[in-house]
Image (tube, rainbow, N blue to C red):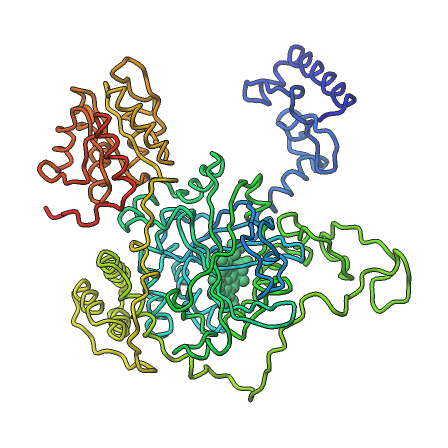
Amino acid sequence: MPTSKTKKTQQASTSRTRSRATSDSTHEERGNGGELHQRAGGDSPPMTTAQGARVEDDQNSLRAGDRGPTLVADHVFREKIFHFDHERIPERVVHARGYGAHGVFECLESLADITRASVFAKAGKKTETFVRFSTVAGNLGSFDLARDVRGFATKFYTDEGNWDLVGNNIPVFFIQDALKFPDLVHAVKEEPDRGFPQAQSAHDTFWDFVGLMPEATHMTLWQMSDRAIPRSFRMMEGFGVHTFRFVNAEGKSSFVKFHWKPVLGMQSVVWNEAVKINGADPDFHRRDLFDAISAGDFPQWELGVQVFDDAFADSFDFDILDATKIVPEEVVPVRVVGTMTLNRVVDSVFAEIEQVAFMTQNVPPGIDFTNDPLLQGRNFSYLDTQLKRLGSTNFSQLPVNAPKCPVAHFQRDGHMQVSTQPGRTAYEPNSFTGADRGPRESGTDGHVPFPAEVDGTMRRIRAESFSDHYSQARQFWISQTDVEKEHIVAAYTFELGKCEIPAIRERVVANLRNVDEALATDVADGLGMPLPAASEPAAPVVETESSPALSLLGNAKETFEGRKLGLLLGEGADAAAVKRLTKAVDKAGGTVEVVAIAVGGAILSDGSTLPAKQAVAGGPSVLYDAVAIIAGSEGGTALADEPPARDFLTDAFAHYKVIGLAGATDALVDAAGLTGKLDDACLPVGTAKDCTAYVSRIAAPRKWDRDLSA
Ligand code: HDD
C-alpha cells in the first residue's frame, strides 16, 4: 500500500503530467507514439530505478537535442538495459523445460518404527512441498508432448531440513553408472555438428548409444510405451528410482523405494495425437497444470513405499543397487503412507520454477543413501550444477530453495549473500558465549550416516550382479496389454526409422531379440529389414512372471474426473442438449470446452449465443479427452464445409476417442469419410437418456479395438 506521503507525490506528479500534456503536447506525442500514458495514480505503485529513485519518464532516453545522440549520463537507461542484458541464466543441462507448483504433503500413518524422518512422524502431519515436472532432452523452449521421460522432482520443506526426492515418471534408468551420464545426455540431445533434432530421441546418436549399451534396453521399453507421452502431469506416476534407506531412531536400516500414484489415475495420449498437440498447443502440460490448480481442481498423488530388508534384498535375482531394475509390486506391495496435493501455482515462473534447485543429496535424518553407483554420482553432480546455473554458493537462500526450519552455520559471505550473519565468531570450536558463540553441533542428533560396512579393492569395475540387462525388460513387455504392445512396436519402428545408419537399427533389433522374438520381428518388419541375429546377452535371460502393475491401460481408472470434453457446436445447436451435457460432464468432475467455427461462439436453438473458448481451427480434437458435436437441425453442412471441423472429427475417430453426436451431423460425418464406420463408441447425445449413456461411456477407456481400416 502506498503511504499517504507517496499518495500525495502521485497526485502531484499526475497533475504535472496533465499540465505538461496540454502545454507541451508535441513532446508527449512524439515520445509516446501519439498515446498519452497514465503516468501516476490509481493503484499502481510508483515506478523507481533498482536503487529506489522515482522514474520520471520511462518512454524516452536522455538525448542531446530532440534528434541527437543518447547520453552516457542517462543512468536510468543504462541501469534498465544492463539488467535486461543479464536476464537469462543457463538453462538446465537436462530437464530444461519444466513447470511446477506448490503443495502440501500429509502423512497418513506414523512410520516411526522404520524411519526417524520427521515428515513421517505421525498421521496428519503436514509438510509443505514444491514440485517441478519436466521433460529431459528438450531445451527450455521445446514442446511438452515430446516422447520423453518426465522428471518428477519434489522438495519437502521438512522441519529437519529439505528433502528432495528427484525422480522420474519411469522407475528405471538408462545407465547403471553415473560416469556414463554425460555420454547418455550427449547422445540424446541435438547432434553437435547440426544442432538438431530438438527434444527427440528419434535419431542416430541416441539409438547408437542404446544399441551399444544393452543396459539401456529395459528403460527404452518404458520410453517406447505410452508412459513417455502422458496426457497430463496430473495423470502420471512418479518414482524415486533408486533404492534408498530408511533408518529408525535405533539406527536400524531398511531398504525403501518411493512411488507416487496419481489419484486421477494414469492416462496417456497416442503418438499421432502427441505430434499434433505439439503443434496445436506446445504448452499443453503446463497449461493443464496451471488451469487445474487455478480452477481449484488440486491434483493429488499418493506416496507409496516398498520396504524390505537385507535378507529379502538378497533373495532377488537382481541387484537392488542397480537402477535399471524395479522391485515388482507383486513381490513387495506398495504401502501408501501419504498424499501430496498441489494447491498453489507460482507467482513467478523464473523466481520459483527456474530457480528451484533440487539435489539428491538433500535428505533429512531418517533417510539415507545406498551404494547405487548412479545415486552416488548424482549426489556429486547436483550441487555443482546449481552453482553453474544460479551463479552463487548462496542459492539455498532463494525463497524457493530456503528450508522452512531454522538454518545456522558458519558458512560465510559469498556472492549475493542476503542474510546478515551476526556474531563475532565464524569458526569453531570457539570459547565465546551468548550471541557471539554461534551455532553448535549436537553431538548426538542430525543426519548420522548409516554405518554400512565398506570393504574391497579399489577398482573401476561393474559388479557381476549388474549384468542381466534383459530379464526385466522382458517382464515389462509380457506385462503389457495387446494395445500397449502395438504402441511399443510402433514407437520402436518410428524411432529407428528416423535413424539413417542401418547398422544402428540392426544392433537395437538384435538386442530386442533377447527381450522377445515377436517384438523384434514386428519391429524388423515395420522397418522393412531382415531380422538380424540376436546379440549375445552378458547374462542368461531369466523367465519371470508378468507384473500387472506395469501396465498403464490395465490399471487405468474409469473416470472423467479432471478430463476435458471438446464440444463442437454448429449454428442452431439444441440449447437444451448443450446445457444437459455441460451439466452432466461437470457432475462427472470434468470440464467442457466450447469450440465453434468462430471464437465468438454459436447461436443456439433458443436464440442465445454461447461464446466459444476456441475457434475450431485453434481447438482441434487432440486437445480433448473426448468430443461431442452438436449441429443445428439443418446446420450440418456449415460444419462440413470447414476443413478444421472435418479434421476435428476424423482425428477424434482415429485417436480411438468416444464421440457424441447430435443434430444434423450426417454431412460432417460424410465429409470426414466416416459414413458407415461409426461404432458403438460414437453415441447420440441429443436426449437426456443419450446424455447419461454418453457421459458414462467417456469415463471408460477409449475405443481401443476401433476398426481404422479404410
Ligand atoms: Fe538428474 C536434473 C532426475 C540421473 C544430473 N534429474 C534432474 C531433474 C530430474 C532428474 C527430475 C530435474 C530437476 C528439476 O526439475 O530441477 N536424474 C534424474 C533421475 C535420474 C537422474 C530420476 C536417475 C535415476 N542426473 C542423473 C545422473 C546425473 C544427473 C546420473 C549426473 C551424474 N540431473 C543432473 C543434473 C541436473 C539434473 C545435471 C540438471 C539440472 C539440475 O540437475 O538441477 O545435475
In the rendered image, the quadrant that contains the N terminus is top right
Q: Residue at x 88, y 58 (%)?
A: 436
In this view of the protein, can residue 93 be seen by the observer? Answer: no
Q: Residue at x 33, y 20 (%)?
A: 610
Q: As displayed, is residue 233 above or below residue 489? A: above
Q: As displayed, is residue 22 above or below residue 575? A: above
Q: Residue at x 65, y 22 (%)?
A: 43
- Where residue 327 sits, quadrant-wise, is bottom left
Q: Which residue is nearer to you in this view: 178 or 675?
A: 675
Relative to 405, 317 lies left or right: left
Residue 70 at x, y percent in the picture: 65, 33
Q: As displayed, is residue 235 above or below residue 54? A: below
Q: Which residue is nearer to you in this view: 481 or 63?
A: 481
Residue 244 at x, y percent in the picture: 53, 68
How many numbered callouts? 0
Residue 514 at x, y percent in the picture: 26, 75
Q: Which residue is nearer to you in this view: 709 or 625?
A: 625
In this view of the protein, can residue 50 be seen by the observer? Answer: yes
Q: As displayed, is residue 20 above or below residue 412? A: above
- Where residue 11 sits, quadrant-wise, is top right
Furthest residue toward bottom: 457
Relative to 469, 294 lies left or right: right
Q: Which residue is nearer to you in this view: 416 or 542?
A: 542
Residue 88 at x, y percent in the picture: 57, 48
